[in-house]
Image: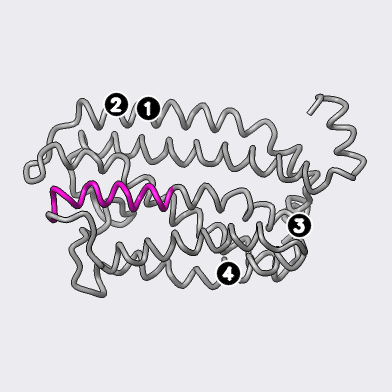
């Protein structure tokens, strides 16, 4: 198998030029899909037969919770790529995506607390799922802190790569916590192996919201990566040409 494309993708210059046409379309598609999903879910989807209208926060909570985990999985993979192959694009990806993942994790915690109040009668319980998501948020903050506190760029890259990889151990705990322990949190809303438990008129707006948020975050991540590439490669000849050409 020819892995030349993989190593080529890891070059900041090539990635910058390849990703430029994709950021804006992904962002626009994400915004449109997210708005459609949220309006559909919050205004037109039927109320839940048990929770009533309070369940509608699911259209925010589930997508941000999924993104929080997906972003960290991507960080862990990028950390492995950097530690094994020393690809320069990997720490750039980690720095670009970590703040986005932290926001997603924080939103998952806040929206979960808002949902928990009418459902469980309390804003917070030390439930296994909630606690493991809190750990996920703290891992994100640790990565961001390391990146901004270490002046040695190579050391910072290695440190965040190691922390990203080690933190992957928390993802199975988040996913299977409701099965391994007796928790208040419900099981998975999305699954690839089973038919959705909710009616289609409630599930489709959730699907739109989730796909929209994934596309929106992908567009933001590409923009952040492009900015970070320009900052790290500012002495490169190709960056100077790019700045002169587009007035960046």
Principal SS element in the magenta part? helix
Residue at 46% across, 47% down: 103
Q: Secondary structure at mark 1?
A: helix
Position of 35 with respect to 120 (left or right) is right
Percent x, y of residue 144: 58, 57
Position of 121 with respect to 140 (left or right) is left
Percent x, y of residue 14: 78, 44
The first of marks 3 and 2 along the sequence is 2
Q: Residues within 10 Å of mark 2 (few under 14, many from 20)?
A: some
Q: Disc 3, disc 2: CB below 8 Å? A: no
From mark 4 to mark 3, how far is it between C-alphas?
A: 17 Å
Residue furthest to the left: 49
From mark 4 to mark 1, how far is it between C-alphas?
A: 35 Å
Task: Report the residue marked by disc 3.
Answer: 88
Residue at 26% across, 75% down: 180
The first of marks 4 and 1 along the sequence is 1
Task: Report the residue marked by disc 1.
Answer: 35
User: Where residue 9 is drawn, which disc sits there?
Assistant: none
The first of marks 4 and 3 along the sequence is 3
Q: Residues within 10 Å of mark 1 (few under 14, many from 20)?
A: some
The first of marks 1 and 3 along the sequence is 1
Q: Nearer the viewer, residue 41 or 160?
A: 160
Q: Quick one: quadrant of the C terminus?
A: top right
Q: Nearer the viewer, residue 25 or 42?
A: 42
User: Where residue 163 is drawn, which disc sits there?
Assistant: 4
What's the image's color scheme? one colour
Position of 90 with respect to 12 (left or right) is left
Specify the segment rendered in magenta.
104-120
């Amino acid at each position: 198998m020819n892995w030349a494309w993989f190593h080529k993708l890891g070059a900041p210059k090539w990635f910058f030029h390849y990703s430029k046409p994709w950021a804006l379309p992904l962002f626009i598609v994400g915004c449109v899909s997210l708005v459609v999903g949220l309006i559909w879910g919050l205004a037109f989807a039927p109320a839940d037969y048990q929770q009533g209208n309070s369940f509608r926060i699911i259209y925010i909570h589930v997508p941000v919770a999924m993104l929080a985990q997906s972003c960290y999985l991507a960080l862990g993979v990028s950390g492995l790529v950097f530690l094994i192959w020393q690809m320069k694009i990997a720490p750039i990806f980690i720095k670009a995506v970590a703040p986005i993942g932290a926001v997603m994790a924080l939103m998952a915690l806040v929206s979960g607390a808002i949902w928990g109040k009418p459902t469980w009668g309390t804003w917070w319980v030390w439930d296994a799922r909630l606690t493991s998501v809190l750990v996920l948020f703290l891992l994100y903050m640790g990565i961001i802190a390391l990146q901004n506190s270490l002046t040695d760029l190579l050391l910072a890259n290695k440190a965040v790569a190691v922390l990203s990889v080690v933190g992957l151990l928390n993802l199975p705990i988040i996913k299977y916590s409701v099965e391994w322990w007796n928790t208040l949190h419900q099981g998975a809303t999305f699954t690839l192996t089973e038919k959705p438990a909710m009616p289609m008129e409630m599930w489709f707006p959730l699907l739109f919201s989730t796909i929209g948020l994934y596309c929106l975050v992908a567009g933001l991540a590409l923009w952040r990566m492009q900015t970070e590439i320009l900052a790290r490669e500012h002495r490169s000849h190709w960056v100077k040409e790019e700045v002169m050409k587009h007035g960046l």
